[in-house]
């Protein structure tokens, strides 16, 4: 299986280079490779994960046949430190059960603390983005109104000055409201 993993990596590089030179070439590289070598895209992804995440020592054991595909896949799910521990504990010949056992032995429930804040939902992130953009736009428009008000003052256009001043005050009010909304969304 290691030879399949290496072939997938080589094809991935070749197709990525080809796509750069030929922008009209469409499709996900993973899907194209899967079609070319007769595997599912998910299986190609599993091989890619092994290539990307295995520590060098474990990659060598996999290539040498001292570790099978399932063990390599389990190891690739682990941190580099955990991989190294399993690799050393098994004298360079880890099995899937060794990786799983290590994960069970070292798995700890995360400690909740006040420092850990919940992440906002995707909808909230979108709202934050929209309100932030609105605040920036209001700031820009308020600045434009103040510049025009100054121009009207210099030209003696008292009606223009009054209108621009009222617009700037209204935009300032809207900006303050949007900033309060933004603060609420970020809580």
Image: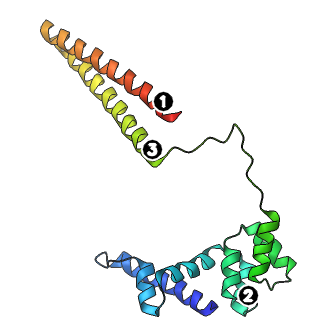
Q: How many marks?
A: 3
Q: CA distance from mark 3 to mark 2?
A: 43 Å
Question: Residue 53 falls in which quadrant of the image?
Answer: bottom right
Residue 176 % position (x, y):
39, 21
Q: Is residue 44 left or right of residue 175?
A: right
Identify residue for label 2. 67
The crowd level at tag 2 (other Cα within 10 Å; few <14, some 14-19, many 20+) is many
Say what secondary structure mark 3 lies in.
helix
Q: Which residue is mark 1?
A: 184
SS at mark 2? loop
At x 38% / y 81%, what residue is drawn?
A: 18
Image x and y of residue 137, in percent: 31, 32
Residue at 52% across, 86% down: 8
Left or right: 87, with 154 as reference point: right
Disc nearest the viewer among 1 and 2: 1
Task: Report, in whole angstroms, how far the alpha carbon at label 3 lies from the one at label 1.
Answer: 12 Å
The residue that appears at 45% across and 48% down in the rendered structure is 122
State which quadrant residue 157 falls in.
top left
Rendering coords of residue 3 (x, y %): 60, 93
Q: Position of residue 186 (x, y in %)?
A: 51, 35
Tell me whether circle 1 and circle 2 mark residues in contact (CB < 8 Å): no
Earlier sequence position, callout 1 versus callout 2: 2
Q: Is residue 12 above or below residue 160?
A: below
Quadrant (top left/top right/bottom left/bottom right) for the N terminus:
bottom right
The answer to which of marks 3 and 2 sits earlier in the sequence is: 2
Its colouring scheme is rainbow
Which residue position is annotated with label 3? 125
Left or right, 130 with reference to 103:
left
How crowded pointer 3 is (Cα within 10 Å; few <14, some 14-19, many 20+) is rated as some
In front: 120, or 91?
120
């Amino acid at each position: 299986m290691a030879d399949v993993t290496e072939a997938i990596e080589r094809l991935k590089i070749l197709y990525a280079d080809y796509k750069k030179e030929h922008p009209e070439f469409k499709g996900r590289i993973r899907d194209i490779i899967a079609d070319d070598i007769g595997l599912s895209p998910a299986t190609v992804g599993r091989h890619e994960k092994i290539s990307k995440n295995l520590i060098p020592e474990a990659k060598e054991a996999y290539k040498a046949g001292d570790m099978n595909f399932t063990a390599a896949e389990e190891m690739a799910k682990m941190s580099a430190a955990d991989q190294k521990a399993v690799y050393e504990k098994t004298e360079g010949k880890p099995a899937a059960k060794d990786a799983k056992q290590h994960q069970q032995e070292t798995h700890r429930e995360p400690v909740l603390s006040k420092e850990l804040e919940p992440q906002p939902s995707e909808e909230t992130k979108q709202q934050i983005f929209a309100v932030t953009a609105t605040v920036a736009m209001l700031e820009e428009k308020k600045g434009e109104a103040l510049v025009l008000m100054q121009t009207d003052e210099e030209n003696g256009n008292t009606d223009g000055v009054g209108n621009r001043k009222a617009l700037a005050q209204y935009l300032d009010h809207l900006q303050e409201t949007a900033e309060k909304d933004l603060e609420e969304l970020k809580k």
